[in-house]
Amino acid sequence: MTAAPIALSCGEPAGIGPEIAARAWDGLRDSLPFLWLGDPRHLPAGTPHAVVGDPAAAAAVAARALPVWPVAFAAPATPGIPHGPNAAGVIAAIAEGVRLVQAGACSALTTAPIHKKALKDGAGFAFPGHTEFLAHLAGVDRVVMMLAAPALRVVPATIHIPLAEVPGALTGGLLEETIRITRAGLIRDFGLPAPRIAVAGLNPHAGEGGAMGGEETRLIIPLLERLRAEGMDLTGPLPADTMFHPAARARYDAAVCMYHDQALIPIKTIDFAGGVNVTLGLPFVRTSPDHGTAFDIAGRGIADPTSLIAALRMAAGMAAARGQGRG
């Protein structure tokens, strides 16, 4: 069976998105066809590309050219300098990717990096980021952000909030939803029938029995005991400073952490270039490279496509696990 291609939304055209898309195509060609959603004017000069009128044509085109699904933008792009009128096109490309995936014309969605301030300033973008916008488009109330690499998968229970606000935001309901969505995603999208999940404590030494904070004894331990009684394979709460060495990582399939840096520092240290941002809880597969728009190097021809290639490959694997991928 030949799968529908992966949809790749262009992201911020003034960033490195168009450049890494072209380089990813050059590295993958027809071994993993994807459909780039954007304005061909924004691709690096000389990029072989072909506008297609049917996503199914991407596989036939990909050996010789980057398949392009055109999305109208107001203007050309200047590397490193976002242009306000182009913000609407960035948003439209994401929405079009969701539409194609939901229609079955594409097997998964991979998104190139956006610049949230540019979208807010240029088009009144009302969402904190990609993840929340995708949840809105999908009609889903709650999704989970996973960062994944071959050596480690991590999920932060709280994400882009000040550290001082984490203890108040970390409720039993939030943590339970995070664990349940993570477990369901590991089963459905990663083919793990009985996933092992490690859960970090919030405080140093996981609270050390209440001597260094009470969130573990008051909130985390009772929740984990209740979920274990349902049959979930959960360990923790564990001291975060001993969770990420190789022997510890071998004992679990994913780690649920309490806040952003607790999760992202270890994975970016272990595999900075190969990390992939995965959204769990959507009715379709979505991945993204784990880096930003990199305005400082945009247009210089030095952007590394490794994370985007990893995101495309992971999207293909997840789609296959859902029965929508290449087989």
Image: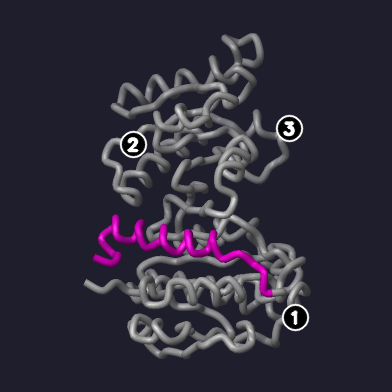
Mark 2 lies on a secondary structure that is loop
Residue 175 in the image: state x and y as whole percent. 50, 33
Q: Nearer the viewer, mark 3 or mark 2?
A: 2
Q: Mark 2: which amino acid?
A: Pro
Question: Based on the displayed image, in which of its 4 quarters is residue 323 positioned?
Answer: bottom left
Instruction: Say which mark, if any, is on residue 195.
Output: 2
Q: Nearer the viewer, mark 3 or mark 1?
A: 1
Q: How many marks?
A: 3
Q: Give the magenta part as a residue range.
A: 301-327
Asked if the residues shown at circle 3 and circle 2 are in contact, with their CB atoms under 8 angstroms apart, the answer is no
Question: Based on the displayed image, in which of its 4 quarters is residue 140 positioned?
Answer: bottom left
Q: Earlier in the sequence, mark 3 or mark 2?
A: 3
**Is 6 left or right of 17, judged from the image as shown?**
left
Q: Mark 1: which amino acid?
A: Thr
Separation of marks 3 and 2 at Cα, in angstroms: 32 Å
Q: Mark 3: which amino acid?
A: Ala
Identity of the residue drawn at 65% across and 28% down = 167
Q: Which residue is mark 3?
A: 164
Mark 3 lies on a secondary structure that is helix
Q: Earlier in the sequence, mark 3 or mark 1?
A: 1
What colouring method underlies this structural image?
one colour
**Is 121 left or right of 301, judged from the image as shown?**
right
Residue 11 in the image: state x and y as whole percent. 60, 71
**Is 155 left or right of 183, judged from the image as shown?**
right
Q: 140 or 323, which is in the foreground? A: 323
Question: Based on the displayed image, in which of its 4 quarters is residue 46 positioned?
Answer: bottom right
Instruction: Say which mark, if any, is on residue 153.
Output: none
Q: Which residue is mark 1?
A: 78
